Image (cartoon, grey):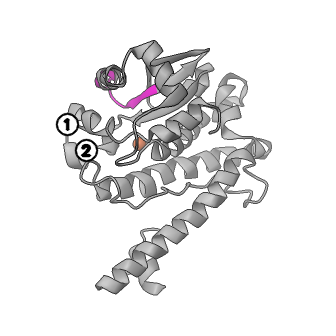
Amino acid sequence: MVTMFAANPAFPSTKPVVETRSTMITRREGLKSLALAAGALALGSQSHPASAQNAAEPHKVPALGYDYDALEPFIDAETMKIHHDKHHAAYVAKLNQALAKHPHLAAKPLDALLSQLDSQPEDIKNDLRNHGGGHANHTLFWQCLKKGGPAPTGTLLKDIETHFKTQQSLEEQLIASGLKVFGSGWVWLAMRDTKLVVETSPNQDSPIMSGAKPLLGIDVWEHAYYLKYQNKRADYLAAIVKLINWDFVAARHAGRA
Ligand SMILES: [Fe+2]
């Protein structure tokens, strides 16, 4: 147990950790258990954030849902670890800090706050947009990724073919759109009205903020790829469109997620 916590950046230790095969397995299983437990709390927090949480921390970082190295060699473990444990955690911490100024908002689903940004208190509107958006976007992003998952089928595939002709054409549009994002932002496959669309947003903006439902989000901030791909965003995008969890996207498309 000590070894597990010592290796987790959330529980830093000054003691060096000597990993044998058995301790590595124990650590991995332990981290996974911790992540799943945190995720269960976080998933609950998305619908009723304040119901069973510390009021000061209504939102939690959700579980990654898989090991840091699950997407190797396309997305390296170090990037996943920093991205999830540091970047996403920072968005959540700053979102909670903002909500502490208006505790009645802590109980509201995040999507509801983001879809009505203009009506939120002026003093935290930007924090909700940037850090609330960051939390929502990354929570979606982790679930959109899977190595070796099946291609889209059924109703989703039909809709893709209606709007983009082929899955390959859709992937090409996602890559081309991602390359056009100036600076940091996201590329999306979203349901806008009744149409499937590829669109982009700057910073941590989300289609939710303009009335659409994001089905798939691809992070094109440099922190998502710089360690492995440096400035080669095209290579990152070419890799990540082959890591899409189409089962999850289909569930979003069907209204099951
Ligand atoms: Fe990110």
The picture quadrant where one finds residue 8 is bottom left
Instruction: Tell which of 9 and 148 is nearer to you.
Output: 148
Q: The residue tagged with tag 1: helix, strand or loop? A: loop
Instruction: Read off the residue under disc 2.
Output: 226
Residue 231 circle label: 1
Q: What stretch is highlighted in magenta?
A: 178-188
Q: Is mark 1 within 8 Å of ligand 1?
A: no
What residue type is disc 2 on? Answer: Tyr
Horizontal and vertical percent position of residue 179: 28, 24
Q: Is residue 181 magenta?
A: yes
- Residue in the picture at 59% in, 58% down: 39
**Quick check: marks 1 and 2 in contact, CB under 8 Å?**
yes
**Residue 15 appears in the rendering:** no
The picture quadrant where one finds residue 174 is top left
- Residue in the picture at 30% in, 83% down: 21
**Quadrant containing ligand 1:** top left
